[in-house]
Amino acid sequence: MSEHRRKPPPQGGGRAAARRGQSGSSSGRRAAPRGATGSPSDSYGASSHESDSYGPGGEERAYTSRAEARRAAQRNTGGRRRAAEPTGRGRRGAPSGPGGGLPAAPGKDRLIDYPRAGKYGVARWVPSWKLMTGLFIGFFGGMVAVAGLAYAMVDVPDIDKTAKAQNNVFYWADGSEMVSTGGETNRQIINLAQIPKDMRYAVISQENKTFYTDSGIDPKGIGRAVLNMARGGQTQGGSTITQQYVKNAMLNDQSQTVSRKFKEIFVSVKVGATVSKDEIMAGYLNSAYYGRGAYGIQAAARAYFNKEAVKLNAGECAFLAAMLKGATYYDPAGATSIDTAATPKDNSRRALTQMQDTLDKMVEYGHLNATERAKYTALPKSQNPRANNELSGQVGYLVDLAKAYLINNTQITAEQLQQGGYSIYTTFDKKKVGELEKAVQKVYKANIKPDERPDTDKYVQFGGASVDPATGAIKAIYGGEDATKHFTNNADATGAQVGSTFKPFVLAAAMKWGVRDKDLEAVQAQDERTKVSPKSLYSGENNFKIKNYDGTVWKNEKGKEWLQENDGKKSYGSPPDYKIDLREAMRESVNSAFVQLGMDVGLDKVKESAEDAGILEDSLTGTSFPSFSIGISDPSAIRMAGAYATFAASGKQRAPFSVEKVTSKDGPVFTHETQTKQAFEEKVADNVTDVLKTVVEEGTGTNAQLTGREVAGKTGTTDGNKSAWFVGYTPQLSTSISMFRLDDDETKKNREFLEMYGTGGEKEIHGASFPAEIWHDYMEQALKGTPAKDFPEPEPIGKIVNDFPTPTPTPTFSETEEETTPTPSPTPSESVTASPSPSPSPSESCQFEFQCPDDDTGGSETGGTEGGGDGISPTPSISESGNSRGNGNGGFFGGPAG
């Protein structure tokens, strides 16, 4: 007998009887008769379980194995235990059945049998199928009740009540009102009969082909939206036309939250059940936003085509249907102030692709015949995107810039701005804006004659920006002749290169990090560098062969050397080495010296220096080519003014901004907080300023001299004479001016910057000519009444590198003890022009994208021929980004010079 078996109770049968039976059998003794034991069970008779243990005649059944006996004992245990209980009452005190029957089953008096009675171990905690079914039915019923209540509580929206939009009021820096805009977004409601069928079918084909048969919601789309929200994204997406109609009608709640989404679902269901499909379609097309401040199909037809909606053709309807996907990226006029990817060229391409896809689907679904569809293979011609005359002149550019700053730098969305209701306090100084516009117009009217000289003067454009070095506030911009006629903001996005105005970043890098040791092993071991003094000597030779920092000749991937040209193909310094110091090199904008300096410092450090000053990385291009140091990149006028402001502020960098604060009826919404970082040590920035003072006092920038004020600045002209710049500053104000020629039709393919030889009656255009003249005239007036301030006296910095022969003296300050006092080198008038005269640069034939083909015929490349290249980046508002044009190839073929 197993010793692990449970001991039998003092009385009763079950396992005890089985064991006694087995014992008795083994000993040869006969089992006692059932009634002889005195067990209480005798009075009840043998239970069914007990009977299983006995054969006929009451004889105990013989078991063939111990396992069989154990199972029989287990069957008997329950019955014996119940029989052993007192006969007066059943389990849990319940009266027993008549005649002392079995007690009630366990757990019968509980509403929910959980944990489960009569179960042991894990089974006790596993819910029964009855419990699970009950819970499901209860939960589902509760949800249905809640949904029914929510359905009953929501109202069908009235789209007519959302037709009024509030104005946004923009203020000048002095608090006076600039313009109240936004009211022009009021939509005009028209009935379905006035909406062309092509417009209805264009939207249905592209957005919701089951519109006339669905219930108004898209469960799969809703699931995707909720899942996207759970992942941390927005709940947008997955909407039917009915849901979009409801969303447009719920203008008072445009938050992207789960609660709003569920509310939208219930309203959509109710709208789908109570409002006709035609009424929903009319409401949607009358409330949707099409861009250009146009809400509703009637306003959109006028904004884009200046016609009534009823007169729209199928192509125009498909075009407007594309605008519903987001006018920022589909309006052919572009929206680079919001996103640099939204260029007129890219937007036109996207709009045409979407329009053609819509027309094809209309044919596929039977809404348009193929013959009619074949008429519309190009974008329809659209009109001026600015219809509000209050946005004429510079105001439209200012408003766009402020709106773009808010969209890119705050929590305020473009949709919220369209709804209006904000008071926006800008940084723009009304007087300075007017003076800058006046200075540009004066030069343009006096010199640019597009009717008399169309081949040289047509398409001439100017751009400009003015930044406060102490705060980063943008005080003034010049975006173009008129915001209602010229749509690109030239202060913010053009794509023109900056040329030699980039050279101060090379000098700052040389002073901040230093040139690398020519011993390669030493550089690799400790990155040995020597910080550079402005007295350091570099070659001013024309067609100078550029070398790597270790003295080896630089070659491109095809093994070609780089020969750097100077402006006018002139050499500076005396033969045979043509050495000049960096002060003179900056003063005369000598390309060869700064290209080699950039190689010695490392182009990665030059790039870092530009970014430290405030130039955005996305606007920098060709960072692995020698010409990078002389400005083949295209930052905007705003960013160039901001970067030079870093030098004006003794190395303190503050990002340009255009909005001080925003309020609404509910109180403050946004307040700008200036972030300052020390981009350069004071002695680095002040030494750069001291060198740039020489440019204005004695060099290429003398036209920018101001009465009674110290000025630092740099001229710039690009290769092919395609753009010209002057960027300069006083301690109180930093300003950049650009000039270039570019076809004003932004929808044209392959637009390119045009040469300016002969423009304005000049042989060629330099930064020292019209840009410096505009800068001077503006700054004289902008600073009128402001006390003159001098720049800080710079501390000595760095060592003289390449100190043979002796450099020219620098009267501004004495250098450190380790520097020598040099004797003057020959003046520029004594310089020798290099004998070889290079052939014209192939880059002059490059297109707008600046993707010039490699020249496989030569053994060396020629650097840019100009002095002081320039350019403005095609970027949005303050948060600019570069374009994809520059791939560095332009550097091989006449990269801009200085």
Image (cartoon, rainbow, N blue to C red):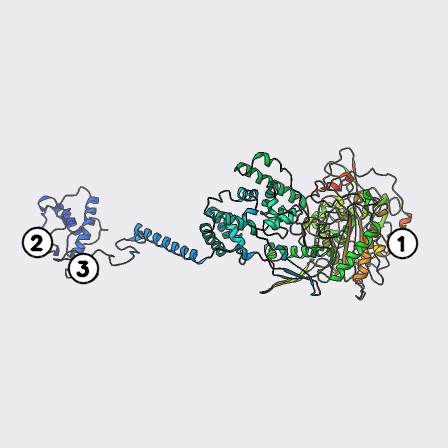
Q: Earlier in the sequence, mark 2 or mark 1?
A: 2
Comparing labels 3 and 1, the label whose residue is closer to the camera = 3
Residue 122 rendering spot, x and y as whole percentages: 32, 52
Tag 2: residue type? Answer: Ala
436, 861: nearer the viewer: 436
Residue position marked by numbered label 3 in the rendering: 90
Residue 141 rendering spot, x and y as whole percentages: 36, 54
* Badge number at residue 823: 1
CA separation, marks 2 and 1? 139 Å
Comparing labels 3 and 2, the label whose residue is closer to the camera = 3
Q: Is residue 851 left or right of residue 772?
A: left
Query: Few, some or many C-alpha atoms within 10 Å of disc 1 (few <14, some 14-19, many ≥20)?
Result: few
CA separation, marks 3 and 2? 26 Å
Residue position marked by numbered label 2 in the rendering: 36
Q: Is residue 261 left or right of residue 110?
A: right
Residue found at x 58% / y 47%: 324
User: Of helix, strand and loop, which one carries label 1?
Assistant: loop
Tag 3: residue type? Answer: Gly
* Badge number at residue 410: none
Q: Is residue 714 visible?
A: yes
600, 649: nearer the viewer: 649
CA separation, marks 3 and 1? 123 Å
User: Of helix, strand and loop, which one carries label 2?
Assistant: helix
Q: Earlier in the sequence, mark 3 or mark 2?
A: 2
Query: Few, some or many C-alpha atoms within 10 Å of disc 3 (few <14, some 14-19, many ≥20)?
Result: some
Residue 727 rendering spot, x and y as whole percentages: 78, 54
Residue 843 rendering spot, x and y as whole percentages: 77, 40
Does 650 sit above or below residue 132?
below
Tag 1: residue type? Answer: Thr
User: Of helix, strand and loop, which one carries label 3?
Assistant: loop
